[in-house]
Amino acid sequence: MLYSPANRDRRLQLRLSERRYLLIAGDVLCVLLAVLIALRVWAWVARDPFTWAEFIWPRAWWFVVLVGAWLLLAGANDFYELRTYTSRSRTFQKLILITLQLWFFYLAVFFLAPPLLLPRLFIIYYGVASLALIAIFHALQPLLFGWASQRRRVMIVGTDWSAMTMMSAIGRHAYYAYDLVGVIAEPDDVLTDLCDVPVLGTGKDIRRLLNEYRIAELIVTSTRDLSTETFQGVMDAYESGASIVPMPLLYERITGQVPVEHVSNNWAVVLPIEQNLGDAFYGFVKRGMDVVMGLMGLVVFLIVLPLLALLIRLDSPGGIFYWQERTGLNGRPFRIYKFRSMRQDAEAQTGAVFSQKGDARVTRLGRFMRKTRLDELPQVVNVLRGEMSVVGPRPERPEHVQRLTSKIPFYRTRLAIRPGLTGWAQVRYNYGSTDEDALVKLQYDLYYIRHCSLLLDLNILLRTVGKVLKMSGV
């Protein structure tokens, strides 16, 4: 199914990151050219001389601002994910969406800014030019990058469940980047194929297969259970220049999830164990952002409180607010606050259970608040008190934490950082209402824990805005 015979094609077999960097570089050039075109149209409409000293240089900051805006919006819209840039229709849809988002944000800033500070039509010129140029660039990508368009030839070392999971991930997310040539089995395996991918040999055959099939990368599903023969074959591949990548790390790069059920007891793959000065700086800046955004949220909360309080009381009997005990940083319990979106006796019969889509306990106003996340607004108090952050894994109830810890490997690692109002799992996955959903969300949460940064936090915040505007809550 994923196998394709080797040939003598000598085009480069780029890594995922290298393919992405090529696309980003091309798109940035398109953005810079689009800014120049927009400035030229601006000068023509205003009948100003289009010279470097008089017109372009005083407005050169637009090049920096719009390149930064492109990278942020492209990241927030998964523009450089495999499933996007390998599909022309999906690429064009995302391009239109990014352009509309840029115009929306510019319009909001335009009306909030002092009069005459920002140009009125320049952003329209730029949006049309950038959309056209980037669309043309991606349409011509096979011609422009034909010298580096060959899929990366890989073999999987191992025939276990992890190997099948990796095959599925490549088939679903990375088919256009990876050519899965075959599988390396242990000497005592009797398989001839695995999920329609041929078993090409054992560890002693790796060096020969590298040359025969021009293998660029070996995916090792288990670094602990390799036989001596297979380990020697992997070392031969490493010394020959092939890349060696553990299955959990490649799965993480492709999907944005940490495969906790496939890392056995290798907890170092799940939790980052090195701390450095950058981590301390990030923590300091993140807390500062939490305070600033928490204060902004508090203002919004105080503005909408009288109206929402009245509507909640008119919609159903009961209190305005609702609180629950949640498990926070390092397992410390705290109270989380919400606007009440369910009837007063919602858990009288069931106890602590996950909310379901179309839950009958949700009130009419509650459905609207949950779709727009308005019911979470009182949690700005938790953010200001330091119990929560703006971005982080969503805090869970102690009853669920205790149950899921006994069922799901590494579940307690979610408690290694402060929980958040929104998180990587919330913007990448639908609302979860089962233990199986909790496992998938944990995989996303662990990815965030391993890669948390200011850029990733900003990416999540932009995605959250999109979720709110689409009213995708449950």
Image: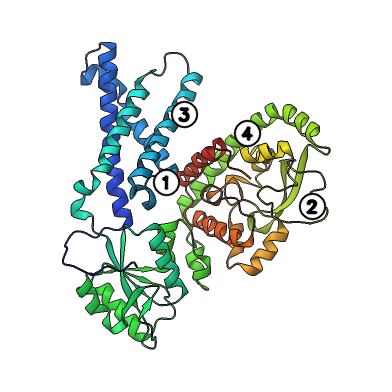
The one nearer the camera, 282 or 307, is 307
Marks 3 and 1 sit apart, C-alpha to C-alpha, by 18 Å
Mark closest to the chain's N terminus, 3 or 1: 1
Marks 2 and 4 sit apart, C-alpha to C-alpha, by 29 Å
- The residue to which callout 1 is attached is 78
Left or right of 397? Residue 437 is left
Let me know if residue 332 appears in the view.
Answer: yes
Q: Secondary structure at mark 1?
A: loop
Mark closest to the chain's N terminus, 2 or 1: 1
Q: Position of residue 134 (x, y in %)?
A: 29, 37
Image quadrant assignment for residue 47: top left
Label 3: few (<14), some (14–19) or many (≥20) C-alpha neighbours in 10 Å: few
- The residue to which callout 4 is attached is 297
Q: Secondary structure at mark 2?
A: loop
Mark closest to the chain's N terminus, 3 or 2: 3
Left or right of 174? Residue 341 is right
Mark closest to the chain's N terminus, 3 or 4: 3
Image quadrant assignment for residue 212: bottom left
Marks 2 and 1 sit apart, C-alpha to C-alpha, by 38 Å
Task: Identify which residue is drawn at 30% across, 77% down.
Answer: 235
Amino acid at the residue labelled 1: Asp
The one nearer the camera, 299 or 10, is 10
- The residue to which callout 2 is attached is 347
Let me know if residue 380 appears in the view.
Answer: no
Mark closest to the chain's N terminus, 1 or 4: 1
Marks 3 and 4 sit apart, C-alpha to C-alpha, by 19 Å
Establish if 50 lies above or below 327.
above
- The residue to which callout 3 is attached is 105
- Kindly check if marks 3 and 2 are in contact, taking CB atoms under 8 A apart as contact: no
Marks 1 and 4 sit apart, C-alpha to C-alpha, by 27 Å
Amino acid at the residue labelled 3: Phe
